[in-house]
Amino acid sequence: MSHQFHQISAPCLITRRSLLRATALGSTAAFAAVMLPSFGSRAQSAGNHINPLAIPPQNEGRSDNGTMVFDLELQRGTSTFFDQIKTPTLGINGSFLGPTLRMRAGNKVRLNVKNSIGGTSTLHWHGMHLPAKMDGGPHQTIDHGTTWSPEFGVKQKAATVWYHSHQLHGTASQVWQGLAGMIIIDDEESDTLHLPRDDGVDDVPIVLQDRRFSLDGRMDYEASRHDTMLGMIGNISMTNGTVAPYFEAKSRLIRLRILNGSNASIYNLGFNDDRSFLQVASDGGFLEAPFKTNHLVLAPGERAEIVVDAGGGNNFMLSSRASSPGMGMMRGGRGMMGGMMGGGSPAFDFLEIRPAQTLNESAEVPSKLADIDWIQPQTAAKTRQFVMNMTMGPMMMMGFGNSHTINDKAMKMSRVDEVVKLGDTEIWEIGNNSPLPHPFHIHNVQFQILNRNGHAPHAGERGRKDTVLVNPGEIVRIIAKFEDYADSDKPFMYHCHILEHEDAGMMGQFTVV
Ligand code: C2O
Ligand code: CU
Ligand code: CU
């Protein structure tokens, strides 16, 4: 692969001047200076994307007696996001982010995770169905200088999932600095479906993030109390760790495996020329049929695979519209508190796609993708309720009490909140009693969304999910089957995937027994 992932050295042409412009004015003004051109009127910004998109190296593992072994090292390094500026970062087998791990359903895998960052960390396999002690959550800490080697069978459908640090109270900072990467799971279905699958050519991993840089090019994690409350939102967007990237499309149809890898930004994605695209997969794999749309809301932790037609001759930009934090994005409403508190995500230009003069022809996307075993609500043995809440009064601002809770409790390592019976199907009703949207994530299972406030989810959410955005005042009902792995000792997590909220306590634990 000719792409350089970890040292985007040579012509990294975002200049020091543009960084200065972005940072000197402080957060809000900086968005205007660098990120602006509003959605829909961005023709002039297309020329600013001057760095070739980095494609993370793929790691398929090595076979050891039939087990696929992945050797990973959490390490410190420096990355060149801006011309001639070295930014201290964390990465996996490199200086920022990590390789794309390629796994096959039915295989047994072992991941040797060596920690060399000089402090404690963990590595969690987000979206994977596995035993709790292999999950890499806050209970599976890896001390500096040691190696943790979880082993499990890949028992799920083809999907784009991911891995990231899950250090108790330290997830936000470690992911911000770079401890995250993608996992692609293949199976017979994905082998035979006529979808683009040439990695880095017409099948491209897309890790979307935003970061806040200081004048000297550092992106240290310094969250104010305000950031803890709203989530840490940056002023510079990056795709696969590349700032202002472009991608040259050689084929007509391009499949993007998109991960919202940000700490706290809800991206409202679309192309600047409003072209439509097909969503083919959600968090846990293929939808039943492609869903044609022109915008895609992805909250932190969520993934979607889309196929876009690069034809038409013009360059076009994958962008995110600005949002205010209290905005009910699915409903198009606007929370009053959100508006009053300010913040929210600015508009971001993520990736310019430049179609080649002549594009290789691609097979049409099949109209039928996969079968989904719909879980019937009548089969549920139990319904549980979860309410996410935030305390934002003066007591919280002074640091008293639990600011971020689920069912009025802040995360406690020694307390198991819920006990689920192995083999049971359950309905979880997830409510949001706060003025901000929260993406709720459940470890170990791929669930299905039954409804939002009684209304069926839209087609892009009708599939396997592990993370779901819950808007203020909304109740999202999901259904899941808890199969295969019982352990009365080691819990799985459920939590808000805004990492600042998770770190502040909006997380709970369940065991499967
Ligand atoms: Cu993406 Cu509990 O994690
Ligand atoms: Cu997870
Ligand atoms: Cu939250």
Image (cartoon, rainbow, N blue to C red):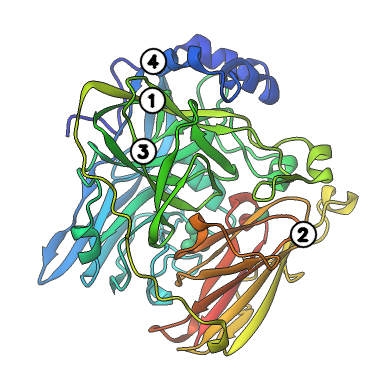
Q: Are marks 3 and 1 in contact (CB under 8 Å)?
A: no
Between the C-alphas of marks 2 and 4, the distance is 47 Å
Give the labeled residue for mark 3: 308
Mark 3, mark 4: which one is toward the viewer?
A: 3
Where is 405 relative to 360, above or below? Answer: below
Q: Which mark is residue 245?
A: 1
Give the labeled residue for mark 4: 84
User: Which residue is found at the position 37% from the left and 17% from the top?
Assistant: 50
The picture places residue 475, in percent across and down from the top left corner, at: 70, 66
User: Which residue is found at the position 47% from the left and 81% from the top?
Assistant: 481
- Confirm if mark 1 falls within 8 A of ligand 1: no
In the picture, measured across the screen, residue 289 lies left or right of residue 440, that is left
Mark 2, mark 4: which one is toward the viewer?
A: 2
Q: Earlier in the sequence, mark 2 or mark 1?
A: 1
In the picture, measured across the screen, residue 110 lies left or right of residue 213, that is left
Q: What amino acid is found at the position of numbered circle 3 in the picture?
A: Val
Between the C-alphas of marks 3 and 2, the distance is 34 Å
